[in-house]
Structures are given as C-alpha cells and as structure tokens.
C-alpha cells in the first residue's frame, strides 16, 4: 500500500507563510513534526503540555482531538489565548491535518 503524503501551512514568528509535508504517524504530534523539520525554537517541555512554546492559532481547518486539562491550563496562562488556540504537542499527526492552516504564537 502506498504511503499517503499530506501538507499543511503555517505562519512562523516572522509572519512568513511556510509549508510542511508529512505522512500519517511519521511523528507522535504536530510539535515534533515541525521541531524536527522546520521550527527549532519550541518544544521546551518535549510535549508534556507544560511550557506553552508550541502555542498555535488555528486559522483554517479544525482539530477534533479534545483539549485535556493540562493543555487548557497551560494555554489559559499564556499570552494570546483564544478560541482558536491549541498546543501543537497535543495534536496527533493524522490525515486530519492535511490542508490545515495555523499561526505560531511567539513571545516577540
Ligand atoms: S512542547 Fe511544551 S507545551 Fe507543547
């Protein structure tokens, strides 16, 4: 069976539009995918939902994965928290991410 390839779009800390490519289950979560290939300045807690460095705002598309208490707590204590906020480390890499657009929330 052929491996399906997917892509997503994100805006980095400089508001630059970037594209990432992935296959399902290539990484545990969205933070690991971007950390490994594209974004080095996040993931301080290695995906435990504690640091908030992987905060993103979903612009297009939706994530059906429910937010747990740790993610909710970290996001609500960070900056620019809104209804479109998620922690990338809590989002599994599935076909659902194909075509999604999000912005990386930075401290600058
Ligand atoms: S890597 Fe720390 S909250 Fe996501």
Image: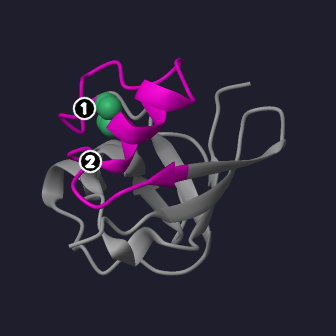
C-alpha distance separating marks 2 and 1:
23 Å
In the image shown, does 82 or 17 lie closer to the viewer? 17
- Looking at the rendered structure, the number of numbered marks drawn on it comes to 2
Q: Helix, strand, or loop for circle 1?
A: loop
In the image shown, does 79 or 106 lie closer to the viewer? 106
Q: Ligand 1 is in which quadrant of the figure?
A: top left
Give above or below for 10 relative to 32.
Answer: below
| Residue 51: quadrant of the picture | top left
Asked if residue 61 lies left or right of residue 12, the reply is left
Question: Picture coordinates of residue 23 (x, y %)?
Answer: 35, 57
Asked if residue 34 lies left or right of residue 50, the reply is right
Give above or below for 103 relative to 50.
Answer: below
Which residue bears the numbered disc 2? Answer: 26
Give above or below for 10 relative to 61.
Answer: above
Q: Is mark 2 within 8 Å of ligand 1?
A: no
Q: Is mark 1 within 8 Å of ligand 1?
A: yes
Question: Picture coordinates of residue 43 (x, y %)?
Answer: 37, 25
Q: Helix, strand, or loop for circle 2?
A: loop
Please report the bounds of the magenta region as a residue range. 21-50
In the image shown, does 45 or 97 lie closer to the viewer? 97
Dominant SS of magenta comes to loop
Q: Tag 2: Cα neighbours inside 10 Å, few (<14), some, or many (≥20)?
A: few
Q: Is residue 70 magenta?
A: no
Question: Picture coordinates of residue 40 (x, y %)?
Answer: 52, 19
In the image shown, does 104 or 17 lie closer to the viewer? 17
Which residue bears the numbered disc 1? Answer: 50
């Amino acid at each position: 069976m052929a491996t399906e390839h997917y892509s997503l779009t994100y805006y980095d800390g400089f508001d630059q539009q970037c594209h990432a490519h992935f296959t399902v289950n290539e990484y545990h979560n969205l933070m690991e995918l971007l950390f490994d290939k594209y974004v080095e300045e996040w993931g301080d807690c290695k995906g435990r939902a504690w640091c908030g460095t992987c905060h993103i705002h979903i612009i297009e598309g939706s994530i059906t994965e429910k937010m747990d208490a740790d993610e909710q707590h970290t996001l609500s204590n960070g900056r620019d928290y809104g209804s479109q906020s998620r922690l990338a480390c809590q989002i599994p890499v599935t076909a659902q991410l194909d075509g999604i657009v999000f912005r990386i929330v930075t401290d600058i």
